[in-house]
Image: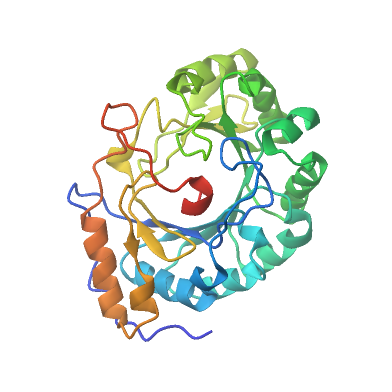
Amino acid sequence: MNGPKLSQSRGNKLVDSYGRIARKLRVSVTDRCNFRCLYCLPDSEITWLPRESILTFEEIYRIVHIAVNLGVQKIRLTGGEPLVRKNVEVLVHFLRQIPGLASISMTTNGYFLLEKVQALKDAGLDGLNISLDTLSREKFAEIVRRDAFDKVIAGIQEARRVGFTPVKINVVLIRGINDDEIEAFTRFARDENITVRFIEFMPLDSAGMWRREMVISAEEILQHVHRVAPFTPVDPDGSDPAKRYVFDDGRGEIGIISSVSQPFCHLCDRIRLTADGFFRTCLFATKEFDLKPLLRGNASDQEIADFLASAVSMKEEGHLINLPGFVRPTRTMHAIGG
């Protein structure tokens, strides 16, 4: 895979009308997933994107290279489940060669880590976020609708063994389902000396089950965390979606992503690329921009760069979840990229 002949950056162009600069790009490599999490996918027949519409590694590489030239610093690979994409570690290896790319991370459900994590580390992956919504084997099967708890736990252990530091565990909290495990996850973070990130339930599920009252707010989460051990907030990084808290004895860390109760849209520096080549300025965007005609036509790198810059300039002020005008995206999380 050879990099495009791209001219040197003339300065960061990915700036929206509110002055926010896009520095992070989330790249979905597939919409397919081997789990059926109740807050994401139905446990029934699913129509996946046709394979011919999915971007090739070469096309992903080209977009990322152009985006980095425009000021993007960090890439996160997502799905669906990114590890169901064959040879995804090869993509990691080639992305790692892009000058100016500071880090490449991945969000995964952990199922394939036992087999894949060493190859990912060798390819140059910098960070892993692993989804784990319960510490109960029985409840895991109810939430994920697959019997895979032991394999995910083994994958987490293997990620730590090969040297991923820190390992971040993502927990989507839903009232009445797993909100009784906040303190257990807090102890887990301390016992294992890892980072647990609690994520507020967002309206991106395929079944439309989301209700505002099902959201566990950041304030409520912290009340439970405090019962386990004293903690101190970390000086905020305005571009980080998680508010971070370290325990006073230095063991373990908690993060809270409060997209619903405490939106951070005014600080957002993220943009997204779907598996089928649509560019999105927000997880909740109601408009997306198709890059495939440019990629599969005769467009130059500069034309693609101008296209990206124009799309970013139209980024919405915020997601409006808490306002009457909120409209759900037509795509659910698995098709957008987590």
Residue 138 percent coordinates (x, y): 79, 29
Residue 47 vertical placement versus 295 (above, below): above
Name the residue: 33% across, 86% down: 298
| Side of 188 where 63 appears, left or right | left
Residue 225 point in image, percent of width and height = 58, 19
Query: Image point 63% across, 65% down: which residue?
Result: 85
Q: How is the image coloured?
A: rainbow
Q: From the viewer's side, name the closer residue of 258 and 248.
A: 258
In the image: residue 218, left or right of residue 286: right
Res 12 visible: no
Q: Nearer the viewer, residue 205 or 195?
A: 205
**Lateral position of residue 223 relative to residue 325, left or right:** right
Residue 234 as seen in the image, left or right of residue 165: left
Q: Position of residue 214 (x, y in %)?
A: 51, 21
Q: Is residue 22 visible?
A: yes
Q: Residue at x 54, y 63 (%)?
A: 29
Residue nearer the viewer, 6 or 253? 6
Question: Which image quadrant: the N terminus?
Answer: bottom right
Measuring from the top left, give residue 46's x and y in whole percent. Answer: 60, 51
Q: Quadrant of residue 188?
A: top right
Q: How many marks?
A: 0
* Front residue (pair 88, 177): 177
**Location of residue 15 (image quadrant):** bottom left
